[in-house]
Image (cartoon, rainbow, N blue to C red):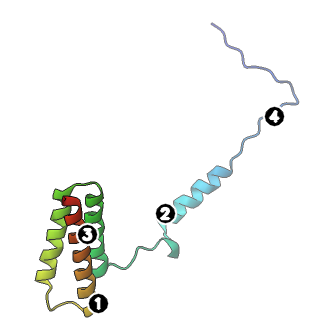
Amino acid sequence: METHEPSFGPAFQKKVDESWKNAVEKEKENSAHPGEDSKLPELNFPLFITSLGVQAFTALEKSDLKQAKSFIDLLDILAEKTKGNLSPEETGHLEALRYELKMKFVEKSQ
């Protein structure tokens, strides 16, 4: 079986947009050498406990009480083990987060 390419005549020229190649190349360069805009936040204790809190709140929103309780218990352990070693701001942040999570947990449990 023989196939034929359609003939559009001499006036027809295929136009190819190759600007995407430049965009891909630029993206590759940016991922290899991240700029100032793509910096990760400074890792610290408040960020760490906030990330645990977010996971607990997410579990509560999904009504996964067992998982939420695990994160709340983990925050309780951190509070006990770090007692006296945190700044007043860190202690306040941890206590407020634990309180909010426990209130939400009780609300979801009922």
The label shown at residue 52 is 3
In front: label 4 or label 3 = 3
Mark 3 vs 2, N-terminal side: 2
Look at label 3 and name its amino acid.
Leu
Disc 2 on helix, strand or loop?
Answer: helix
Of residues 85 and 104, the one nearer the viewer is: 104
For the residues labelled 1 and 3, the Cα–Cα distance comes to 17 Å
For the residues labelled 1 and 4, the Cα–Cα distance comes to 68 Å
Mark 1 vs 4, N-terminal side: 4
Disc 3 on helix, strand or loop?
Answer: helix
In front: label 3 or label 2 = 3
Question: Marks 1 and 2: CB-CB under 8 Å?
Answer: no
Look at label 2 and name its amino acid.
Ser
Asked if residue 101 shows in the view, the reply is yes
Q: Quadrant of residue 4?
A: top right
Residue 75: x %, y % from top left:
18, 74
Q: Which residue is mark 2?
A: 31
Q: Which residue is mark 1?
A: 89
